[in-house]
Structure formats: C-alpha cells, structure tokens
Amino acid sequence: MARRIADEVKRSAGGLVLWWLGNAGFVIRYNEILIFIDPVIELKREDDPTISETGLRLLHELPLRAEELELADIVLLTHHHGDHAAPKTLSLLKETGAFFICPESCLQVLDQVGVNWKRIKKVVYGQKIEYKGVSIAPIRALHGGNHGAVGSKLELGAGYVVRTGRHSVFHPGDTVLLEEHYELRDIEILLLPICHHSQMLLKLPEILAPRLIIPMHYDTYEVTESNRFWTYGNPEDVRLKIGYPERLLILNQGETFRAC
C-alpha cells in the first residue's frame, strides 16, 4: 500500500519540505507556498489504479492525486513529454488557481487543457521569477537521445533552481550536460535523473557538490525494451559512479524530506 500524502501536502510547513511523486515529479512546500514540478498524478481510468494517465503500468500506487488538491501556487514544467506534462493532471491543477511556469514547448499542452494564458509564464533563461519570497531561476535544458548523448535533434526545455529562504533545490529536467550547470552555485538539494538517457548528468554531483542528492526518473513505470532508456535506473549503481556518494538519499514515492 502506497503512502498517501494529500493531508500532509495541504498543511502549512515550517521551512521547506519535499515529496517525490514518482518519475520526475516533486511537490515542495515552503511555509504556505505549494510548488509542483512535473507532476503526473492521475490515472488513465478511475476503475484501474494500476495504469497511469500516460498509459503505462505503475509499479507503485500514486501517493497523491491531482483531484485531491484544492489550492496550489506554482506548477513548474520542464518540457512537453507526457511523463512530465500530463494533460489530465494539468487540467485538474488549473482549478487550484496555480501559476504555470514552463518553456515554450509546453504552451500547446496548457492551451489544450484550457489554462488561462494570464496564469502562464513562459520562461526566459537567466531571468528569475519571484513569488512571495520564492525565487525561481529557469536554466536551459536540452533533451538528449535515448543514450543520453547529443544527437542531431535536441529539444529545448527548462530546468529550475528554486530558492526559498536559505534553501535551494535544483531540478535539471531531461537534459544533456550544459555549460550553465558548471556556473551554478550554492545548490543544497540536487534532484538527479538516473535513467539511461540522463547518464551525462551523473557528473552534476561532482560539479555542484550539493548537500543532498535525491535520485529520480526511475522505478515508476513498468520497464519494457522500448522504454527502458527512460524508465529504468538503479540508485545503488549510481552511488558507485557519482561524486559525494554518501550524500545520496533514496526516497520512496510519497516519502518526505524536511530541510533543516
């Protein structure tokens, strides 16, 4: 039985708390502010809790459903792929009054589900967005190929550095390693994709020396031969490959981390 977190997420927090929602999805609560990153938290059909709205079989029950939320402040989207920008989830989250921050590739998805354009902020790389004491800095992301390498076609997305008080969280999105990553400073929590198409990002712990590294983009959907390049990852194997392996914190879906 999955850990259900709707009641926790709705409560005001003292400081910063985050939960892993599965795949690349996180929810961050900072005092009264509720922020989602790449949430994919709805089902294909209500009568089958084992199938995500992506159409893929879930390895674990969803810890949170979008339909359980009445209020949210910000939804950050890294790119338009269905395992990051999921129409059913976004259609429900638009009813919370949240602002949506995203790269241009996501605008069509948000338009399709009827998000008011006044509640959408298209990212400008290098230009910070301020919201009630939270600073969000969009970082360029370039989606690599199946093997994580630079191919003939790179899709432009976004990563985000979220700074709240004395805390900072970096979600790089799905990307190859970029010059911008070397220029980042004072990253406390790194959300690290560990699937095959993100292998270049295993250098990020060494580059950033974060206080904490939380693996993501694995152990969410049934792995098949056609999707294993983005669904499979082993955090214990990753621990052997990264800088600062002792700082790797493996969360279960729905598990809480509270920053001190």
Image: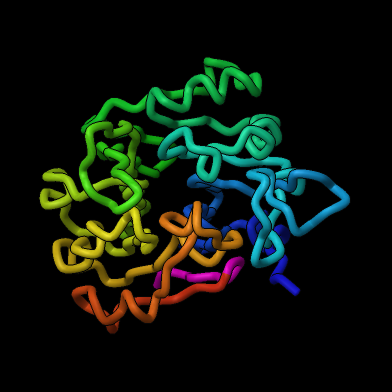
Q: Is residue 80 visible from the viewing direction of this image?
A: yes
Tell me what residue is drawn at x 22 percent, y 33 percent.
Answer: 152
Res 113 quadrant in image: top right
Residue 24 position, x and y percent, is 47, 53
Tell me what residue is drawn at x 36 percent, y 51 percent.
Answer: 171
**The N terminus, quarter of image:** bottom right
**The C terminus, quarter of image:** bottom left
Q: Does residue 42 lie above or below 236 as drawn?
A: above
Tell me what residue is drawn at x 39 percent, y 23 percent.
Answer: 104
187 in magenta: no
Tell me what residue is drawn at x 48 percent, y 21 percent.
Answer: 107
The reply, left or right, for residue 145 in relation to residue 184 is: right
Question: Which residue is more in the foreground, 208 or 145?
Answer: 145
The reply, left or right, for residue 22 in relation to residue 140 is: right
Residue 259 position, x and y percent, is 41, 69
Principal SS element in the magenta part?
loop
Q: Is residue 191 visible from the viewing direction of this image?
A: no
The reply, left or right, for residue 254 in relation to residue 248 is: right
Residue 243 position, x and y percent, is 19, 74
Question: Which residue is more in the foreground, 231 or 242?
Answer: 231
Q: Does residue 239 lie above or below 231 as drawn?
A: below
Query: How many discs mark residues in the rendered view?
Result: 0
Q: Does residue 184 lie above or below 139 as drawn?
A: below
**What kind of colouring is applied to the model shown?**
rainbow
The reply, left or right, for residue 177 in relation to residue 26 is: left
Res 90 quadrant in image: top right
Query: In the displayed image of the protein, which residue is found farthest to the right?
Result: 47
Question: Which residue is more in the foreground, 238 or 132?
Answer: 238
> What segment carries the magenta color?
253-260
Residue 125 position, x and y percent, is 25, 30
